[in-house]
Image (cartoon, rainbow, N blue to C red):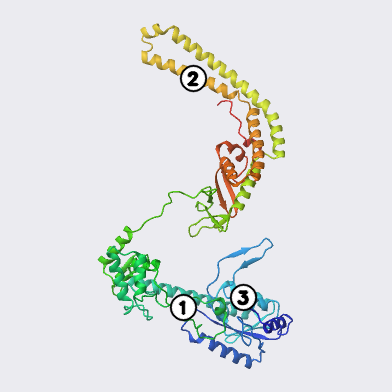
Amino acid sequence: MITKSEERIIKDVQNGKYRDYYLIYNRKSTDEPNNQKNSITHQKLENGRFALTEKLPVAQLTLKGFCKNGIISEKHSAFKEDNDITFSTDGQVQFSIERPKFLRLAQLLSPHLFKGIICLCWDRISRNKADEVIIRKLMKLGIKFKFVYATYDDSSSGALHMDIDGMFAAHHSRVTSEKVTMAKKNLRAEGVCTFKAPIGYLNHGDMRNKPFDPVRAPIVKKLFEMYATGIWSLADLARWANEQGLTTVPVRRRRTVDEMLADDGDDAVLIAPVSRPITSNYLHKILTNRFYTARIPDNFGDWIPSVSQQALVEDELFDRVQKELYRKKVSTHYTEKLDHPYRGFVRCGNSGRVFTPYPKKGIMYYGARCPVGCPHKTTSFNMDFLEKEIGKLISKLKFTEEELVEIDARTKTDLAVFEHKRLDTLDINDRRKRKLREDLTYLRTNKLTLLKTGAYLPEAFLEEESKLNSELLTIQNEEQVSDVSMHEVVKDLVTLSELLKDAELYYSLAETEEKEQIARVIFSELSLSENTLKYQCRNGFKALESRFTHSGDPTGSRTPIPALRRPCPNH
């Protein structure tokens, strides 16, 4: 909530009252907890002394969550940056700034509401390329950046000096990150616990020594022993643990945005750690954690012996608990599914997961639990959205007036060519049929002669006769197919399109059940990708679907009318 005094200060800033004043920026990196040289207190003293020596006027204004007496203090790693980036059609590039106070500072400096910034050194204000781009843009706008530990003149050598400092700042962050990561990998390979030990052990800041918690460890071991008997459920055991006074290890809650923006010097925000009761889920995590058998996960996820702690639970007891957990593991299967519309009809276009219907506040929604990494951002939608999109698909399946005119013209043009080819094929088939009939007549007339002279064995004679009959029947079937005119085929498709027009009107006026029936008659499956509903038509509607370049995408460009396949005269 902005107070009236803060509103007055903001108005003064916007009116240009502080155009000739500087702000002081201090940053304490969360990656450097033990570096006292870069502490907020040290930076305040050095920056304040520099401002007095160089006679740089500092704006005496205080804004909650931003600065105090013109001094900005921020606790954030400048090495970490968001990888998301957006390119607009007008040539603008957008990306996120992870430091909230630095972002607000840049917004105030850009319109020249302040003369410049006083900072300890380059790596206090930037350690990544994204922030460096912003700083250099502000410098080109004429914003003054004064550094206590460095001076950059307006020459090419000064620019080179600045480039080198920026390069070394980024390099230092990368080296620090690599060293920390490699050190943790080496320690884990040795069996050293590099993470916080679970309930039942104490965390004193020594990775090589995780002693038992004298209060919680005996109760945790008792939990394993009781559950291994098979007579305790997780809920009953969690209730018993709470009765014994067992609570989770005290932890501090996450800081709010106001607490993160608080100008509180080097002291941490005083948030009291809180212990919580034991729940069934928390108890399940305890009973399945192999850490209690004096093991830790290595760099590949395999459990190896640990040198940091002693076993609280023997392997034999731990295995009995796992068998008991597996025995009591019951999956839930619905014997009768609720009769919700469009169930199992729509899937995610990327992961293939089904959107399951669920009612909420009188509205039917559809949600899918896509796996991690699925690019599809829409996790749920309501039934109104689905029915509107289905209506659009039905309307786009039918032929437009322009398509009907083109179909009519193409049919008249191609019909003569098609009929000429069909007649030529019939003449060829007539000659083939005459030859087959002559061969059959010869076989039947001279049957006894052919058998007596040994020209044909009885089995070979029957086989030859059967072969000739089969060829003759095939030709007759081909003639029947060739008699089907292209005009009749196109006429059927146009009739189907006209029926879809009626279905579209009926769909717009129908109730939900009737709309679902229409949709399931036309479409075999629907899929949603980036708020675009795609489809697969059932066999009877494939001809209408195939005229689109991209199957299932009625918004795509259309292919010419020959996509409506004509029957081949030879088949």
The local crowd at label 1, few if under 14, some if 14 to 19, many if 20 or more residues have their Cα within 10 Å, is few
Q: Which mark is residue 374?
A: none
Which amino acid type is shown beneath numbered disc 1?
Arg
SS for dot 2: helix
**Residue marked by disc 2:** 471
**Residue marked by disc 3:** 103
Q: CA distance from mark 3 to mark 1?
A: 27 Å
Tell me the quarter of the image containing the N terminus.
bottom right
In the rendered structure, which disc, 1 or 2, sits on the residue that comes first in sequence?
1
Q: CA distance from mark 3 to mark 2?
A: 83 Å
Q: Is residue 313 left or right of residue 520?
A: left
Residue at the spot 69% in from the left edge and 38% down from the top edge: 403
Q: Is residue 294 left or right of residue 430?
A: left
Q: CA distance from mark 1 to mark 2?
A: 87 Å
User: Which one is closest to the eye, mark 3 or mark 2?
Assistant: 3
The local crowd at label 2, few if under 14, some if 14 to 19, many if 20 or more residues have their Cα within 10 Å, is few
Q: Where residue 57 sits: x, y (%)?
A: 67, 89
The local crowd at label 3, few if under 14, some if 14 to 19, many if 20 or more residues have their Cα within 10 Å, is some
Q: Are marks 3 and 1 in contact (CB under 8 Å)?
A: no
Q: Where residue 147 sits: x, y (%)?
A: 60, 85
**Residue marked by disc 1:** 252
Q: Vertical placement of 239 versus 515: above or below?
A: below
Q: Are marks 1 and 2 in contact (CB under 8 Å)?
A: no
In the rendered structure, which disc, 3 or 2, sits on the residue that comes first in sequence?
3
Which amino acid type is shown beneath numbered disc 3?
Leu
